[in-house]
Structure formats: structure tokens, C-alpha cells
Amino acid sequence: MVKLSVIVPFYNVQTYAPDTLRSLRANARADFEFVLVDDCSTDGTPEILQRAERELPGAVLIRHERNGGLATARNTGLDAAGGEYLTFLDGDDWLAPGHFEHLLDAMEDLGCDFVRTDHVQCTGRSRSIHRVPVGRRGEVLRPRDSILPSSRSTAVDYPYAWAGMYHRRLVDRGLLHFTHGLRTAEDRPWIWRLHREADSFAVISHLGIFYRRGIASSLTQIGDIRQLDFIKAFDQVIEETTKDADAEKLLPKAVRTYCAVISHHLGSIERYEPAVARKLRTMSAAALKRMPQDVLNEAIDSMDADRAARLRKVRRRPAPLSVEAAA
């Protein structure tokens, strides 16, 4: 039986894929499989992955006929994975040797639904350590207890799917798949659902994953229409959290986080194409009107002056209520 399935989507990362694949080789084990999903790359990535299929122990290569985005590629990998445990890696990141064994040992020792771990962010030659915003380490916790408080960073603000490992029972419960077709912020509904509905998790202090930032081809660096999928992602967070038994307690956190992300995008609006910038303003105004207005008022009042002013300004814009009308 496969002990661990590692799901790795690739899209036009020929410069970085060799580093990623070398780090997978340094983590290979006889009972590990590496599900490599080529999301219809148009550069040299397919040829690199064809070699990996032959040379990387445990490699399974799946090719998309059409580009579907990261969420869809991860779902393809999840559907093909056979492991008792599952984890993710992006096709332009890399791992320290033995990283997966360390996480697997923690999973088996703790017996929880999932573990989360810290990571190293790499921007050019710069390196910085990013910690899971949970203070208690190495003990089993209740995931929904780590959603709050609203006023500071918590576990749901650390949405990186690759920063952890997950038991197959989460797949069986429908908690590990991503919202099909989301092009950005796909981790946000996913991490909220995981923390609302899973039974147990733990955080371990381990640095074994290296997250590459500032890549010109990354969606986070491109100001096109795909970036606006964050609106769909957070609308989903609000909708699902509204249905939760603890909605009254959890919604202020969800709304405040949504507002912070809207403000962030509006604050860097100059990087968007002009037509997309106009759509961002319109869609942001519509999103604010869809939120519970009493909760929204409290969220904006709790923010610093710059962010609050930015949100109040866009809130005054006339806007349709629906995402479809705004688009």
C-alpha cells in the first residue's frame, strides 16, 4: 500500500522544475508516490516531466489537455492519489531531504487529521522564516479553536496547502478538494473548511519546505483578470461560514479577513491592467454590499486609518450585488 501521496502541479515552470524534482528524489521512499500533474504547460516543462516519470522513483505523470489552474490540478492529483496520507508541493518550490518522513512521523505519533508546519520564503537571494500563527506546538488541538480571534493572525490566515500533511479520512469526508476552477486564493475556502470541519490537528516546528516568491510568471505577480478570483474565493468563505453553527462568532473573522484582502488589492491597483482595475473596484464594492453590514461596520472600524479609508471609499461606489453582474 502507498503510505504517502505527494501531489505536485506544474505549469510553465521549466526553469524551476528540475530543482523541485531533485528535492522529491531526495525525499523518495519505496512506499511514497509522486503524482505529477502537468497543467497543459506550453514551455519545456512536459519534456522535463517525461524524464522524471522514468527516473524519479514513485512518479506518476498526469497531463491536462487544457489548462485548469492550480485548484483543478490539485484535484486531479487528489483523485489519482492512493496514499494513506497526502500532501502537496508546487512545481516551483523545493524541499529539504527527509522533509516528508519528518511530517509523516509526526502524523503517526500524534494521530490527528492533519499537521501544519512552518516554511522558508525565498525571494531572489533573500530568505525569511514564516511560522504557523499557532503558539501551541506538538500537541493535538481542535481546528475550529484556532480560527479566532478576529483581531490577529490565526491558523486560517496561513492557507498554504503544501505546509502540512493530511490523513486520507479528510478526502473521504470531502474536506481536502479545492473549489474547481479558482485561479487564485484557492487555499482560502479550503483552509477555512478544514478548520471548521476537521476534528483534530497539530502544528510542528519544522523547516523543510522552501516557497519561491517573486517569480514573474506567477499569478501573484500578474495583474490580469484571474487575480479577481479572490472575490469568488472569499464569497465562498462567507457563504459557508454563515451556515456554521458558530456563525455569529466566526463571521467577524471571515469578514475582517475579506476586507483586509480587498484593501490589499486596492492598495496595489496600479499593477493591474486598466480594465481589470476598474473591474476590481466594481467587484470590491459589490462584495462589501453582500457582506453582513453590521459585521462589516465593525470590521472596518477596527482597521487602521489607511485601510479603513480605502474600504469606505470603494464602499460608496454604486455596484451590483452579484459577482456575475459585477463581472
Image: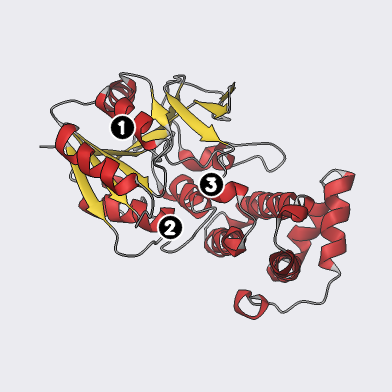
Could you tell which of marks 2 and 3 lies nearer the N-terminus? 2
Q: Nearer the viewer, residue 85 or 97?
A: 97
Q: Nearer the viewer, residue 175 or 224?
A: 224
How far separated are the C-alphas under marks 1 and 2?
20 Å
Residue type beneath disc 2: Gly
Residue 136: image x %, image y %? 52, 23
Q: Does residue 25 appear in the picture of this structure? A: yes
User: Between tags 2 and 3, which lies in front?
Assistant: 3
- In which quadrant will I find the C terminus? bottom right
> What residue did someone put label 2 on?
69
Q: Residue furthest left?
A: 1
> What residue did someone put label 1 on?
21
> What residue did someone put label 3 on?
218
Instruction: Report the residue at 56% width, 36% height from top.
Output: 213
Instruction: Specify the quadrant of the image occupied by residue 18.
Output: top left
Q: Residues within 10 Å of mark 2 (few under 14, many from 20)?
A: many
Count of all numbered marks drawn on residues in the image: 3
Residue type beneath disc 3: Ser
Instruction: Specify the quadrant of the image occupied by residue 40.
Output: bottom left
User: Between tags 1 and 2, which lies in front?
Assistant: 1
Q: Nearer the viewer, residue 294 or 63?
A: 63
Could you tell which of marks 1 and 2 lies nearer the N-terminus? 1
